[in-house]
Amino acid sequence: MLVTNSLERAFIFEDDRHEIRLSDPSGNFSAEAVLNFYSQTYPLLTTAKIEGPEIVDDELQYRFVSTMGTKG
């Protein structure tokens, strides 16, 4: 018998060397919509790009990587 499980999504970004985990506001949101949703609370995310998803510990992890403060 084949069993399928849906994986929870987790959204992670670093701020001042601290990893911040954000919960999934809606399963209907795309990763881009989640980024836009949280960018109102975390302005650092307005310039972030999305990496992932990567399956880690039975969850889909997306990383928001900020490009702010980098040159080139």
Image (cartoon, rainbow, N blue to C red):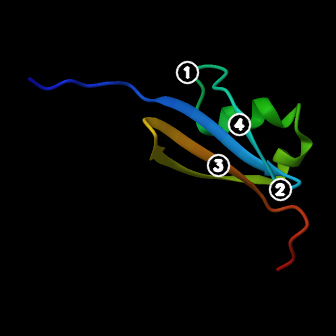
Report the residue marked by disc 1: 28
Dot 2 amino acid type: Arg
Which of the two labelled residues, at mark 3 and mark 1, occupies the earlier sequence position?
1
Residue shown at 79% from the left, 32% from the top: 38
Say whether residue 25 is left or right of residue 72. left
CA separation in Å, label 3 and label 2: 14 Å
The spot of residue 70 in percent (x, y) is 86, 71
Say whether residue 2 is left or right of residue 42. left
Task: Give the class, few, some or many, for how many residues have Cα within 10 Å of label 1's Cα (few <14, many ≥20).
Answer: few
Tell me the mark number nearer the camera, choosing from 4 and 1. 4
CA separation in Å, label 2 and label 1: 30 Å
Image: 25 above or below 65: above
Tell me the mark number nearer the camera, choosing from 4 and 3. 4
Residue that protrudes farthest toward the left in the picture: 1
Dot 4 amino acid type: Arg
CA separation in Å, label 4 and label 1: 19 Å
> 59 and 53: which one is in front?
59
The spot of residue 53 in percent (x, y) is 51, 46
Report the residue marked by disc 2: 17
